[in-house]
Image (spheres, rainbow, N blue to C red):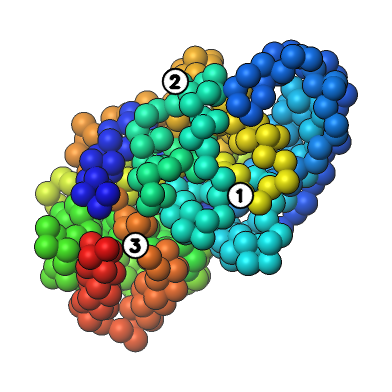
């Protein structure tokens, strides 16, 4: 199973037009959508067989609970629409929705597993599959998937990756959209200045120096130093160093490379020299998008899922995607595409209805609305036939990345403890470097040592 990692990563990276989770922290919300008693048509059962009644009128009313991993101002109203459409199609089912805070949803899931109070359906990221499957908390979906009418529409790379990441080769997750790491720039401002957006680290540093205006609180770049900062950090320093993978063939981490530490110094100096906002050291997603959306910053590293916020803040047509920053050798290291999806908890009291809802979220109808709303790249090929997909300008940009020297690196989410390590240790060390309390070389060597130990433990199983 371990030796399949490279193949699974490569297959996923080669998917054309890919998109990461917003990472914003919001207050939990709960919305209950009433059952709509309308006639259904072509109602499907969880096993893929047609419902003989067509409308489900012979069914007893059922209520299922659905938790979303990242409840925010974009996803909450989005799921209200999706749930309403689902309930119209399956009128005996009511879906109660809860939007969780992105930085604590796994804590909620784990607590619910321990207490036996899990919802029926949830959304997860591909990096979460192993953690939940290892606790025997998820319902296996292979049988339902094999009989699902949209099975052939799902990208096989996504299904293979979901099975691999589970650790036991079983399918527990149905993806609904991928996230492509990219950079965003204020198109109107760049046109007014008569410049192209930064495409290399050298250009970024040059623009940061040229356009920093401390007195008016305006800067070229919004740096993410707080929650969720590890992804931007690693993409920057690996691009600077021209290092395209986290581990050497012998399992040792590449982060001990001297060029990695040099890249961290370059990145940290943007803060130390006052070329980004003083608040950058604690910036999470919400703060970074606010700086970019208010015009305080003109360039931002983030994935495709922030498109809705960016367009809302700056206006459609005033924001555009651009390939990730490249180092001196022309290599831009980009986090390999991640994907979001739905899963069913094993102790659901309504497995048939729960699977129906999970399938609907992955269907061309349900996933299509989620993808266009959140800016995710479809993993259900049926979405490609929808008009919005062909007209979306951002996917054309993403599709060119491979030809522009972008190298996709799989971040080591398969390692036990990596997600928490990135969230706590790496963020704290990075902030210490920004403060000047720690040395870049020592920090990078520490990361390399810890990740090497995690990887060797993984390979020894």
Q: Secondary structure at mark 2?
A: helix
Depth check, mark 1 against mark 2: the one in front is: 1
Q: Residues within 10 Å of mark 1 (few under 14, many from 20)?
A: many
User: Which residue in the structure is indicated by mark 1?
Assistant: 346
Q: Nearer the viewer, mark 1 or mark 3?
A: 1
Where 167 sits versus 356, above or below? below
Residue depicted at 39% across the width and 75% down the height: 425
Percent position of residue 113, x then y: 62, 62
Residue 151, horizontal then vertical, whole percent: 48, 23
Label 3, on which residue?
A: 415
Which residue occupies the foreground of this view, 126 or 50? 50
Q: Which residue is more in the foreground, 32 or 222?
A: 32
Residue found at x 25% / y 52%: 2
- Of the numbered discs in the image, which one, if any, rests on residue 103? none
Q: Looking at the image, which is closer to me, 93 or 314?
A: 93
Which label's residue is closer to the chain start, 3 or 2? 2
Which residue position holds label 2? 152
- The Cα atoms of the two marked residues, 1 and 3, are separated by 24 Å
Mark 3 and mark 2 residues within 8 Å of each other at the beta carbon: no
Cα–Cα gap, marks 3 and 2:
31 Å
Please, is residue 108 above or below residue 170 in the view? below
Is 238 placed left or right of 384 in the picture? left
Give residue 14's quadrant in the image: top left
How far across and how far down the image is residue 365, in percent?
A: 61, 23
The mark that comes first in sequence, 1 or 3, is 1
Query: Is disc 1 in contact with disc 2, using a CB cutoff of under 8 Å?
Result: no
**Of 191 and 450, the residue lying toward us:** 450
């Amino acid at each position: 199973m371990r030796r399949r990692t490279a193949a699974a990563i490569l297959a996923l990276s080669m998917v054309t037009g890919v998109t990461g989770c917003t990472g914003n922290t919001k207050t939990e919300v709960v919305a209950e959508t009433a059952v709509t008693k309308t006639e259904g048509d072509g109602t499907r059962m969880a096993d893929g067989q047609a419902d003989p009644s067509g409308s489900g009128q012979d069914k007893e009313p059922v209520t299922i609970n659905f938790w979303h991993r990242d409840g925010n101002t974009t996803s909450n109203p989005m799921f209200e629409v999706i749930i309403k459409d689902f309930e119209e199609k399956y009128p005996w089912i009511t879906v109660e929705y809860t939007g969780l805070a992105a930085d604590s949803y796994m804590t909620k899931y784990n607590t619910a597993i321990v207490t036996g109070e899990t919802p029926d359906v949830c959304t997860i990221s591909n990096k979460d599959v192993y953690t939940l499957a290892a606790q025997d908390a998820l319902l296996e979906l292979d049988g339902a998937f094999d009989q699902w009418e949209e099975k052939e529409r799902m990208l096989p790379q996504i299904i293979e990756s979901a099975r691999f990441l589970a650790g036991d080769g079983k399918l527990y997750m149905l993806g609904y959209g991928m996230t492509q790491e990219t950079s965003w720039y204020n198109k109107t401002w760049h046109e007014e200045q008569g410049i192209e957006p930064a495409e290399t680290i050298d250009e970024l540093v040059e623009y940061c120096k040229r356009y920093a205006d401390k007195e008016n609180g305006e800067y070229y770049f919004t740096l993410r130093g707080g929650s969720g900062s590890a992804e931007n950090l690693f993409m920057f320093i690996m691009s600077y160093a021209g290092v395209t993978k986290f581990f050497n063939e012998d399992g040792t981490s590449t982060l001990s490379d001297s060029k990695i530490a040099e890249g961290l110094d370059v990145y940290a100096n943007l803060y130390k020299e006052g070329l980004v906002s003083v608040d950058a050291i604690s910036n999470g997603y919400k703060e970074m998008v606010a700086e970019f959306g208010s015009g305080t910053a003109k360039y931002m590293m983030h994935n495709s899922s922030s498109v809705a916020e960016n367009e809302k803040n700056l206006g459609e047509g005033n924001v555009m995607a651009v390939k990730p920053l490249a180092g001196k050798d022309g290599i831009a290291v980009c986090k390999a595409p991640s994907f979001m999806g739905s899963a069913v908890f094993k102790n659901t009291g309504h497995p048939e209805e729960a699977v129906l809802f999970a399938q609907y979220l992955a269907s061309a109808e349900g996933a299509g609305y989620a993808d266009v709303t959140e800016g995710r790249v479809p993993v259900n090929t049926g979405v490609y036939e929808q008009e919005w997909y062909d007209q979306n300008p951002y996917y054309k940009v993403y599709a060119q990345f491979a030809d522009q020297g972008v190298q996709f690196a799989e971040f080591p989410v398969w390692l036990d403890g990596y997600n928490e390590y990135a969230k706590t240790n790496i963020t704290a060390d990075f902030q210490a470097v920004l403060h000047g309390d720690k040395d870049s070389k020592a920090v990078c060597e520490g990361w390399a040592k810890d990740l090497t130990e995690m990887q060797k433990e993984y390979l020894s199983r």
